[in-house]
């Protein structure tokens, strides 16, 4: 196989990772050219996804191919080799913002109709909904997840431990969740057989017997697990009222933690209930005004403030006063930005549980109040499916104190996610129910597979987990256990309907592997959390083998505690048909980084995740194409990354100190030096010896040029779709560095 048969696809994304790519990708291409490795880009950014979905509305020069659709086909082929950077999982406010920006840039796009009034608006909404929420991951993840903190990162964290807040046993912070009427308690599950496989449908039957098709065609195959669950609206609102009252009485902060991006249908609705219960008096008093303005609680308090600007001044002030009264009468809210008065209830995308809960645990189980100080907090996680894991960690810290990053062990993760496994609440099988009645999942032959009683306003969700991904998940878990020697724990609860089905399959498929001398157990998520916490406290290592949602939660929770961030995770997705998807860490903090960059020309985003992902991508390609030069590039990149960490060249948060661009320079210097020092390939040695000398000789000059631009504002002519020329100019300000790269 020749080198040109396969290529690496680098994804163009959003916000800070996108800005960093303007600097880093030219460096990557300079190195990969030496091994005749082709690197191409594909646009999966939010702006790109929006633009690609409305080609008929745009001019010829504005049209772009649907790269996400193309990559969705590529991941099913053995030659797939994709480096996937974090991109926006858009909430409605973010979607509206990108549409507005594109419209202002001359794109003739329709606005997003949140409440469609005709068939045309229904169609427009459906097209936008395809790019909303976690639109990218289910398409690209045709394999299960292998995530872990790389050795060099872990070693660096032990030598340079990040700060952890001290815990007190009398902390009033605690997690609360529903004990009935939620998705966990109502879940029903079944396994599809050859007799029930085929094109099923989801049907709502109201109390009068009138039928409404919620989903017309739903392909089910033999041996896959399907679930159906309901979040009861009345039980949810009653629970929220109790917790708001209790937070007030205990004088602690009230906060809500959801996944309103990934679970783009269900969780914004749940978030909306939190907003409308906390500000109940406001929503009742101004119901008609809010209806006229198109205000939905699902979009948060920020949407209210934005839309009441169009009202007469006295009416706007009246609403603001009523909002203030709710603050005074209710519990204090946890803040996202105390300085700007942005609360936990302002925007649904600010409540992301997998980022917010670990951050609070690092801060002694506290969150920021409006006074800019940390306070004990009530963590409201309405659905009880996985809320218990955070409860266990908080209780563990209350009893044993904070974890010590200099001595603690690690928790790796093997996650079930292939072929949209367990894509809860984020897809076309989740609905807000229009009335009282029942929802049925009906097989092609007319048999009811699952049935749920529902009331108006309830959330119904169904999910699938196919058999081949489950088999692959079990195999991946066994292989990781053999490779590491660590015990592996499947986080499954026999008393939960879905998990009971999975346990049967896990026990069956484990028999297909030699597990002699391997420590593989099955525990409930709560027991597994306790077990893992005890081990990492003792400096021991564990593999968590989990479903999709827990994969997402745990690969933020433990790395943030262990190494201070989840952006430094090594995240490999061995695709089921032989290809590889190499992910580069989390992007939850990316918006704040962009804000600082635009104001001060300092980008504190750390591209370490890209360094970590690029090495296995090159290694994967080298094995498939017998490209020894690619193997050497991968090997020396790992060496350079370790040196980068040892020499502490990660970006600083402080203006006029090393930022993302400076960190790229040092990675380039160390990579070139490693190639110059290796003896396996003379051509690479000669080529990069020149670059290594050029960069080392001009180190001070290059750093001075990179620092000289800091401290002033940057105009990129767009947040979601910056002007490429302006972004390149901003992210590559050192002529000396640029010229050195050009001559190799």
Image (cartoon, rainbow, N blue to C red):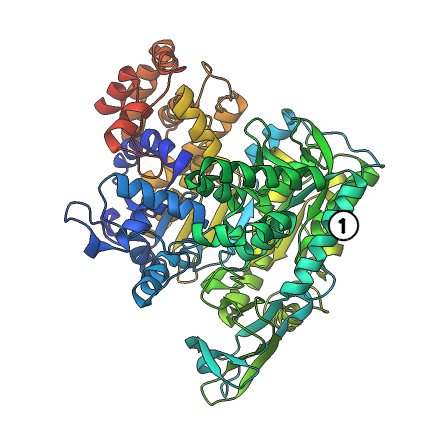
Q: Give the x, y percent position of residue 341.
A: 57, 31
Q: How many marks?
A: 1
Residue in front for this viewpoint, 432 or 645: 432
With 451 as the anchor, is 99 left or right in this view? left
353 to 648, vertically: above or below:
below
Left or right side of 486 for 727: left
Residue 654 vertical placement versus 130 (above, below):
above
Residue 226 figure quarter: bottom right
Q: Residue at x 15, y 45 (%)?
A: 61
Quadrant position of the C terminus in the picture: top left
Residue closest to the far left = 60
Say above or below: 633 vs 667.
Answer: below
Write down the residue under mark 1.
Answer: 530
Q: Say left or right for 440 vs 490.
A: left
Residue 681 occupies quadrant: top left
Q: Position of residue 133 (x, y in %)?
A: 45, 53
Point out residue 577 in the picture as x, y percentages from the top left corner: 39, 62
The 10 Å Cα crowd at callout 1, few under 14, some 14 to 19, many 20 or more, is: some
The answer to whether residue 255 shows anywhere in this view is: yes
What's the residue at 59%, 53% (across, down)? Answer: 284
- In depth, the one of 106 and 4 nearer the eye is 106
Residue positioned 66% across, 43% down in the render: 255
Q: Position of residue 607 (x, y in %)?
A: 44, 32
Nearest the viewer among 679 and 613 is: 613
Q: Is residue 744 visible?
A: no
Q: Secondary structure at mark 1?
A: helix
Give the quarter of the image for residue 155.
top right
């Amino acid at each position: 196989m020749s080198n040109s048969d396969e290529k690496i696809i680098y994804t163009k994304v959003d916000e800070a990772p996108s800005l960093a790519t303007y600097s880093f990708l030219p460096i990557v291409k300079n190195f990969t050219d030496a091994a005749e490795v082709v690197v191409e880009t594909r646009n999966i950014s939010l702006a790109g996804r929006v633009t690609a979905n409305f080609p008929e509305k745009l001019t010829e020069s504005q049209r772009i191919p649907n790269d996400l659709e193309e990559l969705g086909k590529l991941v099913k082929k053995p030659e797939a080799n994709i480096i996937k950077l974090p991109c926006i999982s858009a909430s409605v406010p973010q979607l509206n913002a990108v549409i507005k920006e594109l419209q202002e840039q001359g794109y003739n796009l329709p606005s997003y109709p949140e409440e469609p009034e005709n068939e045309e608006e229904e169609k427009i909404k459906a097209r936008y909904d395809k790019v909303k929420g976690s639109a990218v991951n289910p398409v690209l993840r045709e394999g299960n997840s292998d995530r872990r903190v790389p050795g060099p990162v872990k070693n660096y964290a032990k030598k340079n431990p990040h700060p952890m807040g001290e815990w007190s046993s009398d902390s009033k912070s605690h997690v609360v969740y529903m004990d009935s009427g939620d998705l966990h308690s109502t879940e029903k599950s079944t396994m599809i057989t050859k007799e029930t496989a085929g094109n099923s449908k989801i049907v709502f039957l109201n109390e009068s017997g009138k039928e409404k098709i919620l989903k017309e065609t739903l392909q089910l195959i033999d041996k896959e697990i399907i679930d159906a669950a309901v979040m009861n609206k009345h039980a949810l609102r009653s629970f929220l009222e109790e917790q708001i009252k209790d937070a007030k009485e205990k004088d602690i902060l009230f906060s809500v933690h959801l996944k309103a991006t990934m679970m783009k249908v269900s969780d914004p609705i749940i978030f909306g209930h939190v907003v409308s219960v906390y500000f109940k008096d406001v929503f009742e008093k101004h119901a008609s005004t809010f209806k006229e303005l198109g205000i939905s609680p699902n979009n948060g308090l920020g949407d209210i403030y934005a839309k009441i600007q169009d009202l007469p001044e006295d009416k706007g002030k009246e609403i603001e006063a009523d909002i203030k009264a709710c603050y005074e009468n209710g519990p204090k809210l946890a803040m996202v930005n105390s300085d700007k008065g942005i609360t936990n209830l302002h925007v649904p995308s600010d409540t992301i549980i997998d980022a917010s809960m670990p951050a609070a645990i690092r801060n002694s189980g506290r969150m920021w109040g409006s006074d800019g100080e940390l306070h004990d907090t009530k963590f409201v996680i309405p659905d009880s499916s996985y809320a218990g894991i955070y409860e266990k960690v908080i209780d563990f810290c209350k009893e044993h104190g904070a974890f010590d990053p200099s001595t603690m062990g690690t928790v790796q993760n093997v996650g079930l996610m292939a072929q949209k496994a367990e894509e809860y609440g984020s897809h076309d099988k989740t609905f807000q129910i229009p009335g009282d009645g029942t929802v049925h999942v009906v097989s092609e032959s007319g048999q009811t597979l699952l049935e749920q009683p529902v009331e108006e306003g309830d959330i119904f969700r169904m999910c699938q987990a196919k058999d081949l991904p489950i088999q692959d998940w079990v195999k991946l878990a066994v292989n990781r256990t053999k490779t590491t020697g660590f015990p592996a724990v499947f986080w499954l609860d026999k008393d939960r309907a879905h998990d009971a089905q999975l346990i049967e399959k896990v026990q069956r498929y484990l028999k297909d592997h030699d597990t002699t001398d391997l420590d593989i157990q099955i525990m409930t998520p709560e027991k597994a959390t306790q077990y893992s916490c005890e081990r990492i406290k003792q400096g021991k290592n564990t593999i968590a083998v989990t479903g999709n949602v827990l994969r997402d939660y745990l690969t933020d929770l433990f790395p943030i505690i262990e190494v201070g961030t989840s952006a430094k995770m090594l995240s490999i997705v061995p695709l089921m048909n032989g290809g590889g998807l190499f992910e580069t860490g989390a992007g939850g903090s990316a918006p704040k980084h962009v804000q600082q960059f635009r104001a001060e020309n300092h980008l504190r985003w750390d591209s370490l995740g890209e360094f970590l992902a690029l090495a296995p991508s090159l290694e994967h390609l080298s094995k498939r194409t017998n490209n020894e030069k690619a193997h050497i590039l991968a090997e020396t990149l790992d060496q350079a990354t370790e040196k980068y960490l040892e020499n502490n060249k990660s970006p600083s948060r402080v203006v006029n100190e090393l930022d993302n661009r400076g960190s790229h320079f040092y990675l380039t210097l160390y990579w070139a030096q490693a190639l110059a020092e290796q003896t396996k390939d003379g051509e690479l040695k000669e080529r990069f010896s020149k670059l290594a000398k050029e960069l080392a000789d001009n180190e001070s000059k290059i750093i001075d040029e990179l620092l000289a631009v800091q401290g002033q504002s940057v105009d990129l002519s767009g947040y979601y779709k910056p002007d490429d020329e302006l972004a390149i100019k901003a992210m590559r300000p050192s002529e000396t560095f640029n010229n050195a790269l050009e001559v190799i």
